[in-house]
Amino acid sequence: MNKSLEQQIKEVSLAQTPTFDNKAAVWNQIASQTPPKKPWWTLSISKYAAIFILGIVLTSVWYFSQQKSTKEIYFNNLYESVVQSENHYAYIMQTKYQMVVNMSADDKVFFKDLFDEIEELDKIYQQQKEELINSGFNQHVFQSMVETQKLKLDILNIILMESEKINCHENTSILI
Protein backbone atom coordinates (compact mmCIF):
# COMPACT_ATOMS: atom_id res chain seq x y z
CA MET A 1 0.00 0.00 0.00
CA ASN A 2 2.10 2.77 -1.27
CA LYS A 3 0.08 5.88 -1.09
CA SER A 4 1.57 9.25 -1.44
CA LEU A 5 1.62 11.50 1.59
CA GLU A 6 -0.76 13.90 -0.11
CA GLN A 7 -3.25 11.10 -0.79
CA GLN A 8 -3.08 9.94 2.83
CA ILE A 9 -3.69 13.46 4.18
CA LYS A 10 -6.63 13.87 1.80
CA GLU A 11 -8.23 10.61 2.98
CA VAL A 12 -7.72 11.47 6.66
CA SER A 13 -9.20 14.94 6.26
CA LEU A 14 -12.24 13.61 4.36
CA ALA A 15 -12.89 11.04 7.10
CA GLN A 16 -12.95 13.69 9.82
CA THR A 17 -15.95 15.76 10.74
CA PRO A 18 -16.37 18.32 8.03
CA THR A 19 -15.79 21.93 8.89
CA PHE A 20 -16.39 22.81 5.29
CA ASP A 21 -19.47 21.91 3.39
CA ASN A 22 -17.60 20.22 0.57
CA LYS A 23 -14.08 19.00 1.40
CA ALA A 24 -13.72 17.09 -1.83
CA ALA A 25 -14.25 20.30 -3.81
CA VAL A 26 -11.60 22.10 -1.73
CA TRP A 27 -9.06 19.32 -2.35
CA ASN A 28 -9.85 19.30 -6.05
CA GLN A 29 -9.27 23.05 -6.21
CA ILE A 30 -5.91 22.70 -4.34
CA ALA A 31 -4.87 19.86 -6.66
CA SER A 32 -5.73 21.90 -9.74
CA GLN A 33 -3.65 24.87 -8.56
CA THR A 34 -0.42 22.95 -7.74
CA PRO A 35 1.70 22.10 -10.76
CA PRO A 36 2.55 18.48 -11.21
CA LYS A 37 6.05 17.44 -10.17
CA LYS A 38 8.41 16.75 -13.07
CA PRO A 39 11.30 14.33 -12.87
CA TRP A 40 14.79 15.92 -12.72
CA TRP A 41 15.68 14.85 -16.26
CA THR A 42 12.90 16.87 -17.85
CA LEU A 43 14.70 20.22 -17.74
CA SER A 44 13.48 22.83 -20.14
CA ILE A 45 15.46 23.71 -23.25
CA SER A 46 16.36 27.13 -21.85
CA LYS A 47 18.06 25.47 -18.88
CA TYR A 48 20.04 23.22 -21.23
CA ALA A 49 21.03 26.28 -23.27
CA ALA A 50 22.11 28.14 -20.12
CA ILE A 51 24.27 25.20 -19.02
CA PHE A 52 25.80 24.94 -22.51
CA ILE A 53 26.61 28.68 -22.66
CA LEU A 54 28.08 28.57 -19.16
CA GLY A 55 30.31 25.69 -20.26
CA ILE A 56 31.49 27.64 -23.32
CA VAL A 57 32.24 30.74 -21.24
CA LEU A 58 34.21 28.79 -18.65
CA THR A 59 36.15 26.94 -21.34
CA SER A 60 36.94 30.21 -23.14
CA VAL A 61 38.16 31.86 -19.95
CA TRP A 62 40.40 28.87 -19.19
CA TYR A 63 41.72 28.72 -22.77
CA PHE A 64 42.61 32.41 -22.95
CA SER A 65 44.25 32.32 -19.54
CA GLN A 66 46.39 29.43 -20.80
CA GLN A 67 47.22 31.33 -23.99
CA LYS A 68 48.28 34.35 -21.98
CA SER A 69 50.63 32.30 -19.87
CA THR A 70 52.09 30.66 -22.99
CA LYS A 71 52.75 34.11 -24.50
CA GLU A 72 54.29 35.29 -21.25
CA ILE A 73 56.61 32.27 -21.22
CA TYR A 74 57.60 32.94 -24.84
CA PHE A 75 58.35 36.62 -24.17
CA ASN A 76 60.22 35.80 -20.96
CA ASN A 77 62.39 33.27 -22.80
CA LEU A 78 63.00 35.72 -25.63
CA TYR A 79 63.84 38.47 -23.15
CA GLU A 80 66.31 36.16 -21.39
CA SER A 81 68.01 35.38 -24.71
CA VAL A 82 68.24 39.12 -25.46
CA VAL A 83 69.82 39.78 -22.07
CA GLN A 84 72.23 36.84 -22.43
CA SER A 85 73.23 37.93 -25.91
CA GLU A 86 73.69 41.52 -24.78
CA ASN A 87 75.81 40.44 -21.80
CA HIS A 88 77.92 38.14 -23.97
CA TYR A 89 78.68 40.84 -26.52
CA ALA A 90 79.18 43.48 -23.82
CA TYR A 91 81.85 41.32 -22.18
CA ILE A 92 83.67 40.66 -25.45
CA MET A 93 83.40 44.32 -26.50
CA GLN A 94 84.75 45.49 -23.17
CA THR A 95 87.78 43.23 -23.56
CA LYS A 96 88.41 44.43 -27.12
CA TYR A 97 87.88 48.10 -26.18
CA GLN A 98 90.43 47.70 -23.40
CA MET A 99 92.96 46.53 -25.99
CA VAL A 100 92.05 49.43 -28.29
CA VAL A 101 92.38 51.97 -25.48
CA ASN A 102 95.96 50.83 -24.95
CA MET A 103 96.80 51.63 -28.58
CA SER A 104 99.08 54.54 -29.35
CA ALA A 105 97.56 57.91 -30.27
CA ASP A 106 98.93 57.63 -33.83
CA ASP A 107 97.17 54.28 -34.31
CA LYS A 108 93.90 55.75 -33.00
CA VAL A 109 94.13 58.58 -35.53
CA PHE A 110 94.92 56.10 -38.30
CA PHE A 111 91.76 54.09 -37.51
CA LYS A 112 89.50 57.12 -36.93
CA ASP A 113 87.07 56.12 -39.69
CA LEU A 114 86.60 52.69 -38.15
CA PHE A 115 86.06 54.24 -34.70
CA ASP A 116 83.43 56.52 -36.24
CA GLU A 117 81.78 53.45 -37.76
CA ILE A 118 81.68 51.80 -34.32
CA GLU A 119 80.02 54.90 -32.84
CA GLU A 120 77.43 54.82 -35.63
CA LEU A 121 76.76 51.13 -34.95
CA ASP A 122 76.31 51.96 -31.24
CA LYS A 123 73.62 54.48 -32.15
CA ILE A 124 71.93 51.97 -34.44
CA TYR A 125 72.07 49.35 -31.70
CA GLN A 126 70.35 51.68 -29.22
CA GLN A 127 67.61 52.41 -31.76
CA GLN A 128 67.13 48.69 -32.35
CA LYS A 129 66.96 48.08 -28.62
CA GLU A 130 64.20 50.70 -28.26
CA GLU A 131 62.35 49.22 -31.23
CA LEU A 132 62.61 45.76 -29.70
CA ILE A 133 61.05 46.99 -26.47
CA ASN A 134 58.32 48.93 -28.30
CA SER A 135 57.46 46.10 -30.69
CA GLY A 136 57.05 43.48 -28.01
CA PHE A 137 60.31 41.63 -28.65
CA ASN A 138 60.14 41.05 -32.38
CA GLN A 139 62.43 38.21 -33.53
CA HIS A 140 63.63 40.13 -36.64
CA VAL A 141 64.66 43.14 -34.57
CA PHE A 142 66.52 40.84 -32.18
CA GLN A 143 68.41 39.23 -35.08
CA SER A 144 69.28 42.70 -36.37
CA MET A 145 70.64 43.64 -32.94
CA VAL A 146 72.86 40.56 -32.91
CA GLU A 147 74.13 41.36 -36.41
CA THR A 148 74.95 44.92 -35.32
CA GLN A 149 76.96 43.62 -32.38
CA LYS A 150 78.78 41.17 -34.66
CA LEU A 151 79.68 44.02 -37.02
CA LYS A 152 81.09 46.07 -34.14
CA LEU A 153 83.10 43.08 -32.99
CA ASP A 154 84.40 42.49 -36.52
CA ILE A 155 85.50 46.13 -36.80
CA LEU A 156 87.26 45.96 -33.43
CA ASN A 157 89.02 42.78 -34.52
CA ILE A 158 90.12 44.45 -37.77
CA ILE A 159 91.47 47.44 -35.84
CA LEU A 160 93.40 45.17 -33.48
CA MET A 161 94.80 42.97 -36.26
CA GLU A 162 95.86 45.91 -38.41
CA SER A 163 97.39 47.66 -35.41
CA GLU A 164 99.34 44.52 -34.63
CA LYS A 165 100.54 44.29 -38.25
CA ILE A 166 101.63 47.94 -38.17
CA ASN A 167 103.46 47.50 -34.86
CA CYS A 168 105.05 44.26 -36.07
CA HIS A 169 106.17 45.92 -39.32
CA GLU A 170 107.56 48.94 -37.46
CA ASN A 171 109.45 46.67 -35.10
CA THR A 172 110.97 44.65 -37.96
CA SER A 173 111.93 47.89 -39.80
CA ILE A 174 113.72 49.19 -36.73
CA LEU A 175 115.64 45.95 -36.32
CA ILE A 176 116.88 45.99 -39.93
Image (cartoon, helix red, strand yellow):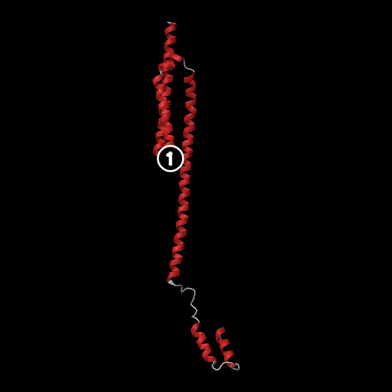
Q: Secondary structure at mark 1?
A: helix
* Residue identifier under label 1: 134
Residue 12 at x, y percent in the picture: 59, 90
Q: Is residue 59 above or below residue 6?
A: above
Looking at the picture, how far across and down is residue 112, in whole percent? 41, 19
**Badge count:** 1
At horizontal 57% and vertical 84% (from top left) the residue drawn is 5
**The quarter of the displayed image where residue 47 is located:** bottom left
Seen from this angle, which residue lies furthest right? 17
Compared across the picture, whether 13 is left or right of 55 comes to right
Q: Name the amino acid, label 1.
A: Asn
What residue is rendered at 51% in x and 85% in y? Answer: 31
Residue 2, x across and y down, in percent? 55, 85
Residue 3 visible, this orientation: no
Q: Residue furthest front?
A: 20
Q: Residue at x 50, y 87 (%)?
A: 29
Determine whether 26 is above or below 71 in the image: below
Answer few, some or many: residues within 10 Å of disc 1's Cα (few below 14, many 20 plus, some between 14 and 19): few
Q: Nearer the viewer, residue 94 or 117?
A: 117
Write the residue at 55% across / 84% down: 6
Q: Residue furthest top?
A: 176
Q: Quadrant of the C terminus?
A: top left
Quadrant in which residue 171 is drawn: top left
Image quarter for residue 44?
Answer: bottom left
Q: Quadrant of the N terminus?
A: bottom right
The vertical placement of 134 against 176, above or below, is: below
Residue 161 visible within the image: yes
